[in-house]
Amino acid sequence: MNLIAIGNGFDLNCGLKSSFYDYICQSMSGFNDVEKVCRLIFVNKLDVFFDSIKSATKNNKSCSAWDILFFVFYLEKPDEKYLWCNVEDDIRKSLFENLNNFSWNHVYEQIHSNLILFNESGLLAYFMIARYGFNSTTSEKDFYGILLEELHLFEKNFSKYLNSQISNTNAYSEKCNKLFEKIGGNNTNTKLISFNYTYSPPLVETTYVHGSLHDDNIIIGINLSDKVDYDIRNSFSKDIRRTEIDSNHFIDDTGSHDQAFNVTFYGLSLDKEDYDYLFLVLDFIGFLTLNQSHIIFSYSLYDDKTSKAILDEVKNRAKCLINSYFLKKKFIFSFTYCVEHKIIEFKEIKT
């Protein structure tokens, strides 16, 4: 069986402007005054920011709390690549680190005592007070409930953006079909696991990990490993949210280990936020047997980087993934062993 897993690098290679940078730049240009208000934070104008954000959010009701949060942290590191995996990491931080042992009353009192809270929790709190008039009597349930609604609004904004980009991208479907064939999609016994929301090749069984534009149910969230029993924050988990839109399993628990599997990863960041799903793929192919599976980490050139630089980056991410998987399974082999025995290989795809 031929199993292919694709991420945002696939869409980018097909000409779709689907990076976070592309989205946030266009979305902020459409939210009157919001970008200017966000920049006040970086000139020590937090008090002005709080007053201004009230007006800005009132006039831009489609701008979500998360749009503002992600944009501010993007502005904080203008020279660094801010990827979709960074977005998910900031959601996790806002819910489980800066708001750990959360007390809304404590955050509220800090803000109204003019204490600067320049972190995820502080910025979200400023927004919630400005847009919803939250105060010291607001419950945690209401706080997180509204935050989840704001995340739905962010997803709606991104869905609208993606649909417009697909319509404006010349020959997008044709480019996707050609690239899919190049990475091994011409095999008749092929399944696709897409971490994107977009492309589905003709006559190929496709599983969307995070929902799809076609079904109008895209998901942006956090890794299930952050889940705490009986915690309202679990509603932000990608795994729990996926069960709400699809009662089927992400993938069968195990594949048929009597057959060989060729697995190709392409355009994926291989970030820890997706480890739960990537581990399920490795479970499915019976990777621990090491004698049936063949994994190819494919890549293409981008951003004027050299082939060696990109290969080194892919190798480092693949090494972290495979060794983390072996560690979780308490397995004695390593990434190095798999490479030396050609169980794992790397392949450049010319585009």
Image: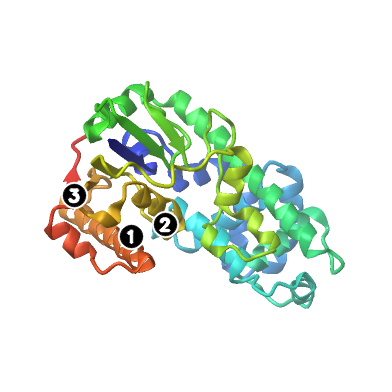
Q: Nearer the viewer, residue 334 or 71?
A: 334
Dot 2 falls on a residue whose secondary structure is helix
Exactly how many numbered labels are in the figure?
A: 3
Quickly name the residue at label 3: 346
Whichever of callouts 1 and 2 sits on the residue coming sooner in the sequence is 2
Dot 1 falls on a residue whose secondary structure is helix
Spot occupied by residue 154 in the image (x, y as percentages of width and height): 61, 45
Residue under the image location 51 percent in, 55 percent down: 87
Check the image and report above or below for 4 versus 119. Answer: above
Pointer 2: residues within 10 angstroms few (<14), some, or many (20+)? some
Q: Quadrant of the C terminus?
A: top left
Q: Where on the picture, by quarter, is residue 226?
A: bottom right
Q: Nearer the viewer, residue 314 or 192?
A: 192
Whichever of callouts 3 and 1 sits on the residue coming sooner in the sequence is 1
Give the CA distance from mark 1 to mark 2: 7 Å
Q: Amino acid at mark 1?
A: Leu
Q: Quadrant of the N terminus?
A: top left
Spot occupied by residue 104 in the image (x, y as percentages of width and height): 76, 69
Q: Is residue 157 left or right of residue 255?
A: right
Q: Amino acid at mark 3?
A: Phe
**Numbered badge on residue 321:** 1
Residue under the image location 54 percent in, 58 percent down: 224
Check if mark 2's residue and mark 3's residue have beta carbons within 8 Å: no
Residue 82 seen in the current view: no
**Numbered badge on residue 1:** none
